[in-house]
Image: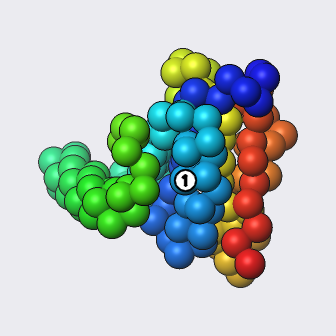
Amino acid sequence: MNIKNVKNILFPTDFSSTSVSALPWVYSLTEKYGAQVHFFHVVEKLGQSGFGYVPAPTLSSWKDQIFKSAEKTFERFCDEQMDQCPNFIKVMKIGNPVEEIIAYANENDIDLIVMPSRARKGMDRLLMGSVAEKLVRSSSVPVLVVNPD
């Protein structure tokens, strides 16, 4: 990738204030290169442990409600944050965040992924690991990791 040819920027978000802290970088890069921003959110799959006791219709309804709630939050987030970014698309997937981000980046000619260095804190980070860290190690697309501090 030639830095002069940045046309598609992927911005994975979890809607946190830490995620918002990376937006000035996204805005700046978008303005400088005339890039399109792909606002991307992944709803993590529900774990399978213990769900064998939940009737399938109940579990399906619960998953639908979670997805619909995430859609509303995503819409609100984009409405609040996108005034400085005229050329964007919104994408929401269900699955493993790292796997979904990498797959989307590879399938959609993404030139750069921009994200904060951390969103989860404390025990969540220890248990779940860092999405940014895993992306830096696994992605063939360059990743710009922004320190939120």
**Above or below 7: residue 20:** below
**Residue under the image location 36 percent in, 51 percent down:** 52
Q: Would residue 85 be visible to someone looking at this image?
A: yes
**Above or below 131: residue 8:** above
| Residue 8 in picture, x, y percent from top left | 56, 30
| Residue 129 in picture, x, y percent from top left | 73, 60
Q: With 46 as the anchor, is 98 left or right in this view?
A: right
Question: Which residue matches tag 1?
Answer: 27
| Residue 69 in picture, x, y percent from top left | 24, 61
Q: Would residue 59 be visible to someone looking at this image?
A: no
**Above or below 64: residue 88:** above
**Above or below 1: residue 147:** below
What is the residue that sits farthest to the front in this orientation? Answer: 32
The image quadrant that residue 112 belongs to is top right
Q: With 91 as the anchor, is 111 left or right in this view?
A: right
Q: With 35 as the anchor, is 72 left or right in this view?
A: left
Q: Quadrant of the C terminus?
A: bottom right
Crowd class of label 1 (few under 14; some 14 to 19; many from 20; radius 10 Å): some
What is the residue that sits farthest to the right in this orientation? Answer: 137
The image quadrant that residue 122 belongs to is bottom right
* Numbered disc 1: secondary structure: helix
The image quadrant that residue 140 belongs to is top right
- Residue flagged by tag 1: what amino acid is it? Tyr
